[in-house]
Image: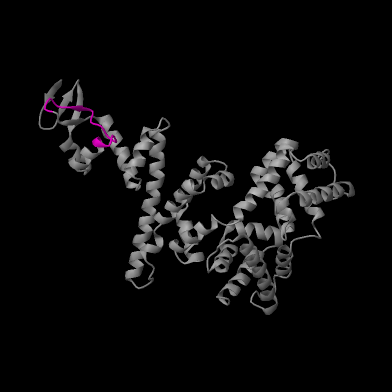
Amino acid sequence: MIDSINSSKIKVGGVAMKTIKQVSDLTGISVRMLHYYDKIGLLKPSNFTDAGYRLYDDETLETLQQILFFKELDIPLKEVKKIMASAHFDKIQSLKSHEKLLILKRNRLNGLIDLVNKTLKGETTMSFKEFDMSEYYNALEEFKTEHKNIIIKAYGSMDKYDKFIETCKSNEAEIVKMAIKEHGSIEEYVISMKKNFNSDMFIKEDQFSEFKNDCLEDNHPKLKELYKKLVSDLSKDHSSKEIQQIAEEITNTAKRDYKIFKMDNGDDYWYSMVQIYLGYPEWIEKIDKKYGNGASKFIGEALNNYLADKLPKIITLYEKLTSDLNKEPSSKEIQQIVEKIAAINKKSRESLKVDVGDNYWGYTADLYLSNPAYIKVNEKKYGIGASKFIGKALKFYSENNK
């Protein structure tokens, strides 16, 4: 029963309502679209007049606001309905997410406006198409159905993959910058990304996972015995003869019994596995939980010590490259080393069927030159100024080998 009606207010049961026309005027959503929202079950009216006209209360208008937020983020109405109907839908959390994504969208639009202004001034000729990320996100979503098993193995679960997509959205500017530098455009980057989802790198990831799982679950009796023996006393010197003999046995056992360490470049993969004990937080946490605090570092250092004179060729090349930072990065001697590094890198990518952009080395050079994480790691490893030295050497190689 309607309590009262005037030109601006309608009350039903003491609750203020708005007509569909008033809602249309307030929101800019057409009456026809509001009818459609009702038809598909996305937004039902709160009540009806005696004549059958739709009425909306404040709670329903809040729901409409949520719908408009989703719509602003280009989420299809079918998906919006599923999200809002979910038992896990949290209005407050959703608003926080909307805020983050809308800020990203605002920043991106501001950047595009700046780009247009520069273009008008003749400073650049780059087009909007190169900044269109929709195809990239569509490709990530497609992988959820096309490569479900691969995604779960690579990311742990679909939820973690969804979080990865959200992380991509929050770092969109960096992805755009990387994609254009390395591949020339977002379109080419997406093509490359699709190829890589069908490459052999995920097979290698499976093989890595098999070894790591066997270590954690004690599925390999010999390795179980050796690892327990290795960490029985973490106060021992990891370079001692006793510890190094165990490290040798672990290395030989892994190379004998696991396919990934038996292939042509198996030594490289084993070296990479050893580095995981020293620098991969999730793995370190699991190993320390299994054997005690500091166990992962002890294992990594013991195995690393054993491999000191058995390093992969590409590692020795980087050491040779940075052996004298006073040399000229563009010199013939340095460029010959870079050529060997590039050749090994190319062979590795080809064996995995991994596609990288035409400007792979130019982009990589920029990372060494300006990325704080790269600079920190490489200066710790090779000395102050090493990262910029490598970057300059790779930059020269890139510019002269196109």
- From this view, report whether residue 68 is shown above or below residue 62: below
| Residue 303 on image: x %, y % | 79, 50
| Residue 285 on image: x %, y % | 67, 40
Q: Quadrant of the N terminus?
A: top left
| Residue 189 on image: x %, y % | 48, 61
Image quadrant assignment for residue 310:
bottom right
Q: Quadrant of the C terminus?
A: bottom right
User: Most extreme residue toward the right, as rendered?
Assistant: 241
At x 55%, y 69%, the residue is 362
User: Most extreme residue toward the bottom, as rendered?
Assistant: 332
Instruction: Decide if residue 332 is in sight here.
Output: yes
Colour option used: one colour
User: Which residues lie in the magenta part?
Assistant: 38-51
Is 297 on the left or on the right of 400, as rendered?
A: right
Numbered label tally: 0
Instruction: Decide if residue 385 is in sight here.
Output: no
Q: Any magenta on residue 271? A: no
Is 172 on the left or on the right of 258, as rendered?
A: left
- Majority secondary structure of magenta residues: loop
At x 11%, y 27%, the residue is 51
Of the pair 303 and 102, the residue shown nearer to us: 303
Is 197 on the left or on the right of 22, as rendered?
A: right
Q: Any magenta on residue 45? A: yes
At x 70%, y 59%, the residue is 381
Is 243 on the left or on the right of 41, as rendered?
A: right
- From this view, report whether residue 69 is shown above or below residue 383: above
| Residue 393 on image: x %, y % | 63, 72
